[in-house]
Amino acid sequence: MIRKSIILLLVLTFAIASVPGVQAQSLWVDNSPAATMFYDRRAHEVGDILTIIISETSSASRSGNAANSKSASTSLDAGVGLFTFIEPVSGSSSDSFKAQGSISNTNKVTGRLTVTVTEIKPNGQMVVSGTQTIKQNSDEQKITITGMIRPEDVAADNTILSNKIADAQLKIEGKGPLTRKQRQGILTQVFDFLF
């Protein structure tokens, strides 16, 4: 009886040992960093994208005044002795100049533009660049922004304010019938250049 039990136990042990190991696997497999709920979704690597909130206002004004005046007079008395034929002569001249001018310029740009991280500097700062093109009928407007940002300035919702971008370059270019109508004609440009 004991001998049968030992043989049975040995057979069962051998049978269990010969069965390959089984591992439980989940139905959801995702090895990306975003799979964890504690992942920080802010941009931090080349190729990541983030949204720039553009809110730029600039104004400049300048005024100047200039005035200049000059006057001169001269006179020559009548000649005496041998020079009696010389009549008395007098003359005067004056010149004046006055100018006034003023310049006032105000610009305001608002919007949102999504850009891509193109480079990571050794100090951790990120170089970003992005372009947005809007075409409506025959008019096209192209907005381009480039610059450098600090990772700590990126908000939790993966946005950054445009005034936190270093070396920012914001270009707004347009082409089409509406843009052409806003330009001066060729003759007007020639007259402005000459006069």
Image (cartoon, rainbow, N blue to C red):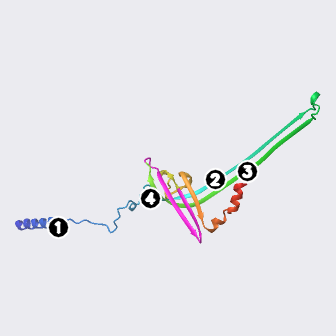
C-alpha separation, residue under disc 3 versus residue under disc 4: 46 Å
Query: Mark 4 near mark 1, Cβ–Cβ under 8 Å?
Result: no
Image coordinates for residue 85, horizontal then vertical, percent = 94, 33
Callout 4 amino acid: Asp
Q: Please name the residue that numbered disc 4 is placed on.
A: 48
**Residue under the point 59% across and 70% down:** 138
Q: Please name the residue that numbered disc 1 is placed on.
A: 19
Q: Tell which circle, 1 or 2, labels the residue nearer the N-terminal end.
A: 1
Disc 2 residue crowd, few under 14, some 14–19, many 20+, Cα 10 Å: few
C-alpha separation, residue under disc 3 versus residue under disc 2: 17 Å
Disc 1 residue crowd, few under 14, some 14–19, many 20+, Cα 10 Å: few
Callout 3 amino acid: Ser
Residue nearest the observer in this picture, 24 or 188: 188
Let me know if residue 184 appears in the view: no
Q: Quadrant of residue 53?
A: bottom right
**Secondary structure category for the residue under label 2:** strand
Q: Please name the residue that numbered disc 2 is placed on.
A: 58
Q: Which residues are magenta?
A: 122-145
